[in-house]
Amino acid sequence: DGLGDVPESDAPGLELLQKKKAPNAMIKYAQQNPGEVILVATGPLTNLAVAVQLDPSFPKKLKALYIMGGNTDSRGNTTACGEFNFVADPEAAYIVLDRYNCPTYIAAWEFSCRSSLPWSFCDEWLAQKTAKAEFMTNILVSCLQKARSPEYQKEITAGKGFNPCDVFALAAAVDDGFITESEEVAVTVELNGTHTRGMMVLDYMELLKKDHKVFIMKTMDLEKLKKMLMKAVM
């Protein structure tokens, strides 16, 4: 359920759900607030692809787009060369990277693997005696159990720790000062290939002749991120 499947006696009711589809809602908010909306995508890009097909001018109304997904060095986590969010809907990822010409920042899988948070920090973070820390502890039980497994830890390239991959894109959207190094390059997505379907392609040689380039996050100020996370559960 997005909250660790933790039983909750006073959970919000289903009557709060709205019938409006996500692509239509995004288009509406952007139309009402042109140049002010920062869109953060931490899952498959299906809704974004649908939105731009419904309204081709939608990307122009966004202030920026932040994506957690894709890969830069052919390191996969779902297929041999594919990251989950892009592999789940390669055509959608292709459309978004092809048609969203707003400022775009990508926190790729390899970037998150290089930026893991030490377990010592995670223990300190969740040990705070606050209602927010208790809430986070409860909803992260299954997530952290999986993250500590040997299968998951072998993906981490910066020492053992927790890879909160979506957090990196969200933090950068809140404050782009978190990004300490990035590179600007044109990208696309492989739609065929026996092993490479869904892999993000970085066009360093500029053979694709694309005018729009994205910002690939390379490094992040992890100490600043730790402080933000600590403050968030106080």
Image: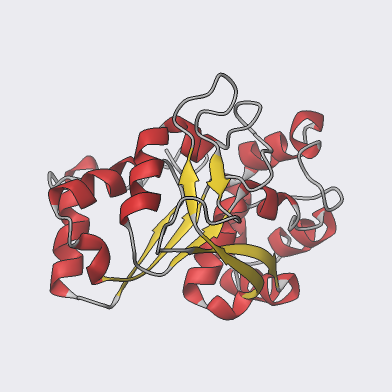
Viewed as shown, does residue 233 lie left or right of 34? right
Q: Is residue 94 shown to the viewer in this render?
A: yes
Name which residue lies at 35% across and 67% down: 102
Q: Residue at x 57, y 59 (%)?
A: 167
x and y percentages locating residue 170 in the rendered image: 50, 64
Q: Is residue 17 visible?
A: no
Residue reaching furthest to the bottom: 177
Q: Is 181 above or below relative to 120?
A: below
Residue 22 image position (x, y, % from top left): 22, 48
- At x 78% / y 63%, what residue is drawn? 124
Give whichever of 198, 122 is nearer the camera.
198
Q: Return the x and y of residue 36 as percentages of the image width and height.
A: 28, 78
Residue at horizontal 22 percent and vertical 51 percent from the top:
52
Q: How is the image coloured?
A: secondary structure
Q: Could you say where residue 153 lies in the image, as x and y percent from the top left?
A: 79, 38
Quarter of the figure with the N terminus: top left
Q: Given the current orientation, which residue lies at the most extreme top position?
A: 194
Left or right of 95, for residue 108: right
Q: To which quarter of the image does residue 29 belong?
A: bottom left
In the displayed structure, would residue 3 be above or below residue 66? above
- Pick the quarter of the image with the C terminus: bottom right
- In front: 116, or 95? 95
- Count of residue discs: 0
Q: Nearer the viewer, residue 146 or 163?
A: 163
In the image, is 13 to the left or to the right of 80? left
Residue 101, compared with residue 193, is above or below; it is below
Q: Quadrant of residue 43?
A: top left
Q: Quadrant of residue 111?
A: bottom right
